Every structure is written in structure tokens, then in C-alpha cells.
Image (cartoon, rainbow, N blue to C red):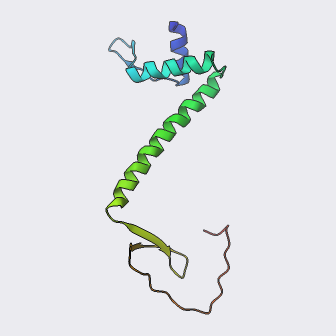
Amino acid sequence: MHPQTLRQYDRLGLVEPRRSAGRGRRYSLRDVADLREVQRLSQEDGVNLAGIQRILDLQRQVVALSDELERLRAAVADQRRVFTADPSGAVVAGTLGRRVSRVRSGALVLWDPRRR
């Protein structure tokens, strides 16, 4: 790639290379993979730079959310908890295999989806 193209991608935030002591750009293997993806999206798929930025942001978001999901799954795997709603509508945690006591009431509760 042309150095001016690399500078433009750096300015736009498509890649964020580290800097050497002399302020030169140092690209990691991840940066090189991102640059190849930018080039492929631009040349083969005809995506403009704003679209490429959005695609890369969404890909990073998917990775972050997948990591978070795995972390949460690992955290609850040992506890095997279930969540239920109490009569007031608040969410309460219970344990798997244990019944939640019911309150028998003749009250009529209307559900309002706008209310949280």
C-alpha cells in the first residue's frame, strides 16, 4: 500500500499502529490483517471508507460481545441459577430444582410494556 493511503487509514481510525521512538508507524500482525481486509472490502466489494469503518467497528463489537457472553456463561455455569419474577414484578434469582413460593392473590395486574 502507498504510504499516503496508510496515513489516511490511520487518520480515519481504520487501523491504529503503534509508534516508534521516532514517531514512525509500527504495524502489528493484527494491523496488517485489518489493512488487508480494508483493501479487500474497498477493491473487491466496492465499499467506501465510511462503510469499511462501520464494518470493522461492528466486527470488533461482535468479538467483544462474544467474549462477554462466554464470560457470563462461565460465571453462571457453576451456580445453575434461574431467574423468576416476584408478585411485584421484580426479577429474583432462585436455584435450579427449588420451587419459588407462590403468593395467592385475587389482585389483577395489568401489564404495561412501556413501564420498566
Residue 56's place in the image compared with 8, above or below, is below
**Percent coordinates x, y for residue 83 in the rendering:** 46, 70
**Percent coordinates x, y for residue 105 in the rendering:** 57, 92
Q: Is residue 91 at all visible to an observer of this figure?
A: no
**Percent coordinates x, y for residue 46 in the rendering:** 67, 19
Left or right placement of residue 43 versus residue 30 in this view: right
Residue 3's place in the image compared with 106, above or below, is above
Left or right placement of residue 114 versus residue 70 in this view: right
At x 60% / y 32%, what residue is drawn?
54
**Percent coordinates x, y for residue 114 in the rendering:** 67, 67
Q: Nearer the viewer, residue 97 or 62?
A: 97
Left or right placement of residue 21 versus residue 46 in this view: left
At x 55% / y 36%, what residue is drawn?
58
At x 38% / y 72%, what residue is drawn?
96
Residue 1's place in the image compared with 88, above or below, is above
Q: Is residue 12 at all visible to an observer of this figure?
A: yes
Left or right placement of residue 34 versus residue 46 in this view: left
Q: Quadrant of the C terminus?
A: bottom right
**Residue that extends furthest to the top in the rendered view of this protein:** 2
